[in-house]
Amino acid sequence: MSVSVASQSDLEFTRAFEGGEIPASEFNHLAHLRMAYVYLCRGDLNYAEQKMREALLAFLDANEIPREKFHETLTRAWIMAVSHFMSRRDASAFSEFIAHSQALLDTKVMLTHYSAAALFSERARTAFVEPDLEAIPC
């Protein structure tokens, strides 16, 4: 089993995000992946999902973005994907991890696991929906 760790920079980024110091305009896909990586370094899949949900909902509230923007299935699916890639090799920082996990940078990769109808349904937004095309490896 691979063991990855979060660098001091990763931990500072997470603290800044949780503290509301990261502007909404700078919280992109890569930043989402970085948060998932840090939370997975700290705990298991369930822990990472809970922490990510809490952090994202607080972020939406702090930036006066409607909570409806939060997508339960996408959040959990990306954490599962990051976890899968983390299990394949050790990393001493997110930058090292992502350099060897380029497939995660494709924001449309979840459409290889989900049909658009399933992924973008209201049900998938509010509760986790299992992939209807191909399972996400864990």
Image (cartoon, rainbow, N blue to C red):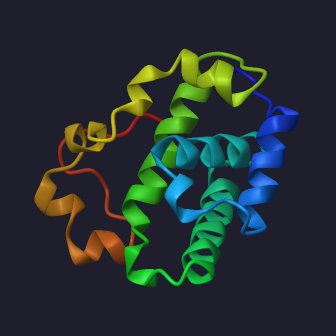
Q: Residue at x 76, y 24 (%)?
A: 3
Q: Seen in the image, is 66 located left or right of residue 16? A: left
Q: Residue at x 32, y 63 (%)?
A: 129
Q: How many marks?
A: 0
Q: Residue at x 27, y 50 (%)?
A: 131
* Observer-nearest of 79 and 98: 98
The quadrant in which residue 117 appears is bottom left
Q: On screen, 11 above or below 102?
A: below
Task: Find residue 126 and report its horizontal and vertical position in percent.
Answer: 37, 77
Q: Residue at x 33, y 72 (%)?
A: 125
Q: Seen in the image, is 41 located left or right of residue 130? A: right
Q: Seen in the image, is 19 located left or right of residue 50? A: right
The quadrant in which residue 89 appears is top right
Task: Find residue 26 and report its horizontal and vertical position in percent.
Answer: 55, 53
The quadrant in which residue 128 appears is bottom left
Q: Seen in the image, is 104 located left or right of residue 98? A: left
* Observer-nearest of 16 and 107: 16
Task: Find residue 96 and report its horizontal and vertical position in percent.
Answer: 67, 18
* Observer-nearest of 26 and 46: 26
Task: Find residue 113 and report its horizontal and vertical position in percent.
Answer: 25, 42
Q: Quadrant of the N terminus?
A: top right
Q: On screen, 23 above or below 36?
A: below
